[in-house]
Image (cartoon, rainbow, N blue to C red):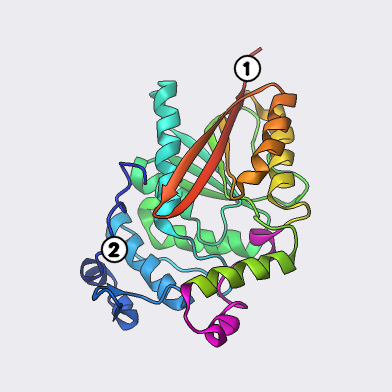
Amino acid sequence: MHPNNIHNSTYDFDVLITSHQDLSSYLSVNSYGNKSIDFSNNQAVLELNKAILKHYYRLNDWNIPKGYLCPPIPGRADYIHHIADLLTKDGSNDQVKGLDIGVGANCIYPILGSQIYNWKMIGVDINMTAVSAAQANVDLTPNLKKNIELRHQENNANIFEGIIKPNEYYHFSICNPPFHSSEDEATKGTLRKLKNLSTSNEKTTSLVLNFGGQANELWCNGGEALFIKRMIKQSKNYKTQVGWFTSLVSKKDNLPKIYKQLNKLKAIHKTVQMSQGNKQSRFIAWKFQKE
């Protein structure tokens, strides 16, 4: 993980339950003799996230509607820290303002950007239920209200149009795009993930329907690669209003297609590698030459 990530060590459950007592109901001792939770249990993961956000990020409370994505906070924080590195290299001393494309009900990137770096954040989503839930999370902690604004993207064909207003400038955009190309592919992916977390196949099958993720969070036509290529194409119209455009890329096999689109539009780009334990991830960052 990034050296500035507070989650570089294992979870201290004894400390976490001092901030969120409800987590204690889901603790057990694993085969190594350590306290842990069942990570295939969506309610346990939700309570863990609440504890993390209360203890480390000074939230009063946090919640998501049933069936929406419950994000792994250490990995999300890593992305935020690497964005900070990009901005540091640019040498700007301005108040940082970021744009989260697909903020989701969890509102996790704006929350982390606000609480770690005091960034101003705009969160955008095409799903009005997600926007309302994100706003409810912001409203729970008064300090977030001065840094976070939520906007609804009414046209799902657009990514930036209708969101970025004239004369607005963002130091970066951030995005966790839909991974899959269909509901069937998304369901199979979730099932694989849960089988890795659970020793009970029966339990895993019953959890797959509610572990997390709405259609717009998990899949879109053409999957991740086409979504990012579309984002790149549309981003050129806002090249003077965004410093760095960025997006997670979950499947490294998609990188050649993404690079081809970036090179076609003559964008400057870099790929930033990240790791959380055995999991390898990455994001692509691009910008355009000033004319």
The residue carrying mark 1 is 289
Horizontal and vertical percent for residue 75?
43, 52
Horizontal and vertical percent for residue 190?
60, 69
Q: Is residue 119 above or below residue 189?
A: above
The 10 Å Cα crowd at callout 2, few under 14, some 14 to 19, many 20 or more, is few
Instruction: Give the quadrant of residue 12.
Output: bottom left
The 10 Å Cα crowd at callout 1, few under 14, some 14 to 19, many 20 or more, is few
Comparing 149 with 182, the one in front is 182
Numbered disc 1: secondary structure: loop
Viewed as shown, does residue 106 lie left or right of 12?
right
Amino acid, disc 2: Tyr
The residue carrying mark 2 is 11
Q: Is residue 4 above or below residue 182?
A: above
Residue sticking out furthest to the top = 291
Viewed as shown, does residue 144 lie left or right of 18?
right
Label drawn at residue 97:
none
Q: In which quarter of the image is the C terminus?
A: top right
Earlier residue among tags 1 and 2: 2
Numbered disc 2: secondary structure: loop
Cα–Cα gap, marks 1 and 2: 43 Å
Q: What stretch is highlighted in magenta?
A: 197-219
Residue sticking out furthest to the bottom = 202
Horizontal and vertical percent for residue 27?
31, 79
Residue placed at 68% from the left, 42% from the top? 228
Horizontal and vertical percent for residue 13?
26, 69
